[in-house]
Amino acid sequence: MKLIKRNDIITVAIDSPAAAGAGTQAKLIAKHFNLQQLDTGRIYRVIGKLKIKNPKKFNHSLVKKKINVLKIKDLIDKSLLSDAVATSASIIAKDKMIRKIVHNFQLHCAFNPPKKFSGSVLDGRDITSVVMKNAMFKFFITANIKTRALRRYKELKMINQTLTYKEVLKSIKKRDKSDYNRKISPLRKTRDSILINTTNLTKRSCFLKIKKIMDRKLKA
Ligand code: C5P
């Protein structure tokens, strides 16, 4: 499908390591500024789950078929939140062809959101560096590893996942290592991204910080 780009839209790109709070901030930004939101990690999770469910049949054409019919609303699925799916996602995310398939889906969401939206906000690992290099706003959201593990531990507990804090910490460390060190589209902070450390910030105070930065530029 040819990529149509809407002019004059607000574009927000966010990258972050796992469980740093980027998804929460993306949701708040989307709501406040009327933007289409895409948590790109969920797309990799859909594919990670596809691999768990079809270990023998899993290949690029199966992935293509799945992504061709994928709708943003399909990404709201609690089964995607498990640690096993997250780990599987970080493994399939190293595959060049899979990244290419996901890339096209992301471009449409980023640059041609439905007319009712004033723009888009995407978060992931390679959004500021690859997918939305020219976004109007670029943020790198992070927090220290223990804080991130504790937040993820609490989230997993809420969906009845029986992992200990130590296991969650180990899993996040492993995923960080893979996401920062992989050859294709590794996670990194681009020079033009604004660093936000959420370790000692509440959700609200973090959002107000981001809002202030965005308002300043939008009102100028
Ligand atoms: O953000 P989330 O933790 O849901 O992402 C799951 C995994 O998907 C990440 O650990 C990463 O390996 C992969 N991912 C990626 N590029 C993105 C978003 C997620 O490689 N833009």
Image (cartoon, grey):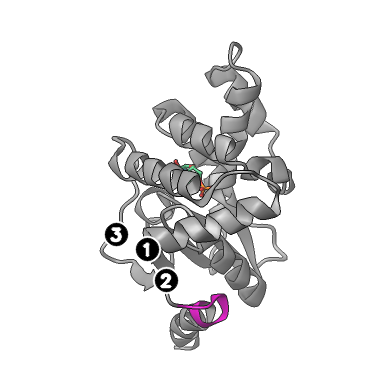
Per the model, the C-alpha gap separating discs 3 and 2 is 20 Å
For discs 1 and 3, the disc positioned in front in the rendered view: 1
Residue in the picture at 50% in, 62% down:
22
Q: Is residue 14 visible?
A: no
Look at mark 2 in the image and give the residue it sits on. 199
Q: Is residue 70 magenta?
A: no
The magenta span reads 201-206
Q: Nearer the viewer, residue 218 or 45?
A: 45
- Pinpoint residue 108: horizontal percent, then vertical percent: 58, 48
In the rendered structure, which disc, 1 or 3, sits on the residue that comes first in sequence? 1
The relative height of residue 120 versus residue 42 in the rendered view (above or below) is below
The reply, left or right, for residue 123 in relation to residue 159 is: left
The response on whether ligand 1 sits within 8 Å of label 1 is: no
Q: Residues within 10 Å of mark 1 (few under 14, many from 20)?
A: some
Look at mark 3 in the image and give the residue it sits on. 190
Per the model, the C-alpha gap separating discs 1 and 3 is 19 Å
The relative height of residue 171 versus residue 220 in the rendered view (above or below) is above
Q: Nearer the viewer, residue 71 or 219?
A: 71
Badge 3 amino acid = Thr
Confirm or deny contact between disc 1 and disc 2 (CB under 8 A). yes
Residue in the picture at 38% in, 48% down:
130
In the rendered structure, which disc, 3 or 2, sits on the residue that comes first in sequence? 3
* Residue 144: numbered disc: 1
